[in-house]
Image: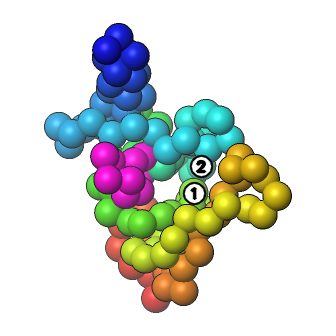
Amino acid sequence: MKRIIWYIGIGLLLCSCGSGRHYEAFQYDNGNDYVSEGMYRIVDRKGHIGYADENGQTVIKPRFAFGYPFEDGKAKVTDTGERKEVPGSDGEYWYWESDEWYYIDKSGNRIE
């Protein structure tokens, strides 16, 4: 029971985002996601990816199946796909496979 309470407490500390909802920071390389171009990835309870600013304020609510960090003002995201383990990594590394990638701007709008 104590472990569950500790986990919930840490989750709320990670990102007390401005929308009134609480999201956790996406876990990358055994830690919280890094800030790239003023944004980092957040995750909701269903595992959807969104983005918050450096102050922990939600900028793009979690709605993507997966998304990469922002680079050159855009982020590569997808609404579909599957998480797959990198062969030979014994479950330590994984990647997202999808045939429907697209880019969004820092407001969450799709870029064509």
Mark 1 secondary-structure assignment: loop
| Residue nearer the viewer, 6 or 12 | 6
Q: From the viewer's perspective, is 47 left or right of 74?
A: left
- Report if residue 69 is visible in the image: yes
Q: Residue at x 57, y 57 (%)?
A: 69
80 up-or-down from 95: above or below = below
Rendering quarter of residue 84: bottom right
Crowding near pointer 1: few (<14 within 10 Å), some, many (20+)? some
* Tag of residue 11: none
Side of 39 where 96 appears, left or right: right
Q: Reply above or below: 41 against 9.
A: below
Q: Is residue 38 above or below residue 1?
A: below
Residue depicted at x 69% and y 50%: 91
On the image, the x and y values in percent for residue 37 come to: 57, 51
Question: Which mark is drawn over residue 69?
Answer: 1
Q: Nearer the viewer, mark 2 or mark 1?
A: 1
Q: Position of residue 105 (x, y in %)?
A: 44, 69
Looking at the rendered structure, the kind of residue marked 1 is Pro
Give how far apart the Cα atoms at labels 2 and 1 are: 6 Å
Range of the magenta residues? 42-51
Given residues 112 and 5, the one toward you in this image is: 5
Q: Does 89 lie within the magenta span?
A: no
Per the image, label 2 sits on a secondary structure element best described as loop
Q: Residue at x 27, y 36 (%)?
A: 22
Give the label on residue 36, or none: 2
User: x and y percent of residue 66 in the render?
Assistant: 48, 64
Q: Are marks 2 and 1 in contact (CB under 8 Å)?
A: yes
The answer, for residue 75, to whether it is visible in the render is no
Q: Residues within 10 Å of mark 2 (few under 14, many from 20)?
A: some
> Residue 21 falls in which quadrant of the image?
top left
